[in-house]
Amino acid sequence: MAAYETALFGLAIFFLGFILKRAGVLSEADSKPLSKILLFAILPAVIIQAIWSARLEASLLNLFASAFAVVIPLTVLGFAFARLLKLEGPVKGSFVTAFPSLEGALIAYPAILAVFGAEGLSRFVVFDIGNALYLFTAVYAISTISGKGKFDSREIAPMLAFNPLIWADAIGFALNLSGYQNATLSSFLSMAGAPLLFLVMLSFGIEFHPHLGALKLPALSIALKTGAGLAIGVAVASLFGLTGIGRASVIVGAQLPPSILCFVFAKEHGLDSKYLANLSSIALPIGLVVSTIVAGMLA
């Protein structure tokens, strides 16, 4: 029930943003400062808390490694499909940024928890840490390069080094591996990250343009990404010899819709954020239902 409530609340916030834009209360220009708040404040808090609280064990290294075995082929396929579809410019940058990304927190977490309980979620978190590392390094680099229109290796390292999401990763792992515990800090991070769903879905609503033509590419993207993800997930789970909850974590994770962070990346780097807003507006609710069904079938 919690998974469907999350989808329902998210859709309600999305439509609130759209209604406020149509009423003239908000404009598309207002989504820019919202994306900065997400990138420099709320998202780092969410990342640190998630990695800090994850249960890291040597026996779970296969799940961690399997995340890279999933997202790397998705990256290659993203560029191949973009070429096949003859995408160019900002929309191509948004497409190749979104295709290998996986929305774990808002989609997989409630779906896995509803089907497998806390034990299942603790396994999936390990997979999602690998996914997060790839997202905040390789996918972010793809987004940056696509937005700048050229590749300059001298700019990539310093750009990533000063990215708040990269530092959030490092702090989260440092806290986890050190065994440090602080209830006050944990509560602060939880409070700081609480507006994530609200602000992201509000931004989606502000950016959304309900034109049938604008939804054709997002709908095709969802079909390609979900189908390719399921096939890759099954193959990777077999390759790593995973069974039970581990196998379900990889297969469910591989078919997830694009990460909502891609929308933030697009706003920062001048990519096609409208395409990502339209994509996420239909991919997230569909992804939640599909993920719950897939998890149930694998239980």
Image (cartoon, rainbow, N blue to C red):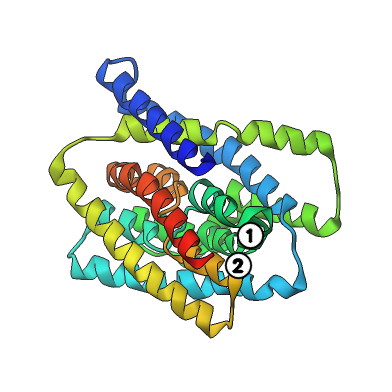
Which residue corresponds to mark 1? 120
In the image, is 266 to the left or to the right of 157? left
Residue where numbered disc 2 is placed:
245
Q: Amino acid at mark 2?
A: Ile
SS type, badge 1: helix
Viewer can see residue 149: no
Quadrant of the snapshot with the C terminus: bottom right
Q: Residue type at mark 1?
A: Gly
Residue 138 in view here: yes
Q: Residue at x 31, y 47 (%)?
A: 279
- Whether residue 293 is situated above or below residue 185 in the rendered picture: below
In the picture, measured across the screen, residue 235 lies left or right of residue 185, that is left
In-image side of 214 versus 115 (left or right): left
- Discs 2, 1 touching: Cβ within 8 Å: yes
Q: Name the residue located 76 percent from the left edge and 73 percent from the top edge.
A: 58
Q: Nearer the viewer, residue 122 or 70?
A: 122
Instruction: Say above or below: 162 vs 137.
Output: above
The residue carrying pointer 2 sits among few (fewer than 14), some (14 to 19) or many (20 or more) residues within 10 Å by Cα, namely many
Residue lying at 43% horizontally and 64% vertically, measured from the top left: 152
